[in-house]
Image: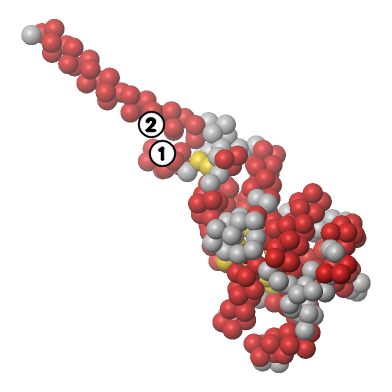
Amino acid sequence: MLNFLSFFYRQSRRRFLYPLVSALVAVGMVVAAPLPSKAISWIDLLIQGAQIVQLSNISDKQEYQIGRDINQQLVSSEIRILRNPGLSRYVDQIGQRLAQESDRPDIPYTFQVVADKGVNAFATMGGFVYVNAGLLTGADNEAELASVISHEIGHITGRHAIKQMRQMALARGVAQAAGLDRSMAVQIGVDLALRRPKSRQDELDADRRGLATLERAGYAPSAMVGFMEKLLSAPSVPTVLSTHPATKDRIVALERAIEPNRANVGDGLNNVAYKAKLRSYLGS
């Protein structure tokens, strides 16, 4: 009888210890990285351990969730979204038309107008695209606007932000063997969206993807070249070009990719109609 009780006791301890050891291992993975000096509860540590993201194998759902968190931080403290329902709906219609013809049509896309007069646009992972109001008024027609949006979609379909996030995490020494803490991923994502210079390879890839999307969506491909050329001749370099390398090389690559007899075939080249539509939304 005593032997049976001893055996039962040992088995019970083993069943209890296995989950405890697993939990301690998860905590160890988190505390191995430098932590702030203030006390953190075991529950908080376990939650942090559950939020590790493996960037080399991130799913569409995880990418969207991180992009959503990046967006929340951007709109709450970094940028101001223009509250103009008509203009926002117009930009979203163009964006959704392009997104459905992109290389990743099945992820949710969000297109927002930023209340900023600078000629700029950017994107974050998970389908979030931001277009400055200044870019809308800087474009001559809808096809030019669509060309910039399609370029930003190209960054999303190419997963460029994920690659850049991985590189920055390694450079900062914050990536762990198991991956990257989700809160740190959001922090890096905000930094990438606002301040990270773009690489030549990523820009050329986004141009290539964006041009293909623009044409499949039925817009005239010449607008992408036209918009870049116009910005290059501006008195001061617009933000949209200041963070992008070798714009002249990009123009040459685009011109080679566009069939001359198809350059002006497609929608969106009516300058008068576009400006009239903007005036109806902006009231001027």
Q: What residue appears at the point 53 percent right and 31 percent down from the top-left corner?
A: 32
Residue 282, quarter of picture: bottom right
Badge 1 element: helix
Residue under label 2 = 23
Q: Nearer the viewer, residue 96 or 64?
A: 96
Amino acid type of the residue that numbered disc 2 sits on in the rendered structure: Ala
Q: Nearer the viewer, residue 149 or 47?
A: 149
Q: Residue furthest front?
A: 261
**Quick one: quadrant of the N terminus?**
top left
Badge 2 element: helix
Residue under label 1 = 46
Question: Residue 156's x, y, as percent?
Answer: 65, 56
Q: Are marks 1 and 2 in contact (CB under 8 Å)?
A: yes
Q: What residue appears at the point 80 percent right and 54 percent down from the top-left corner?
A: 204
Question: Residue 117's x, y, as percent?
Answer: 73, 76
Question: Residue 242's x, y, as percent?
Answer: 82, 62
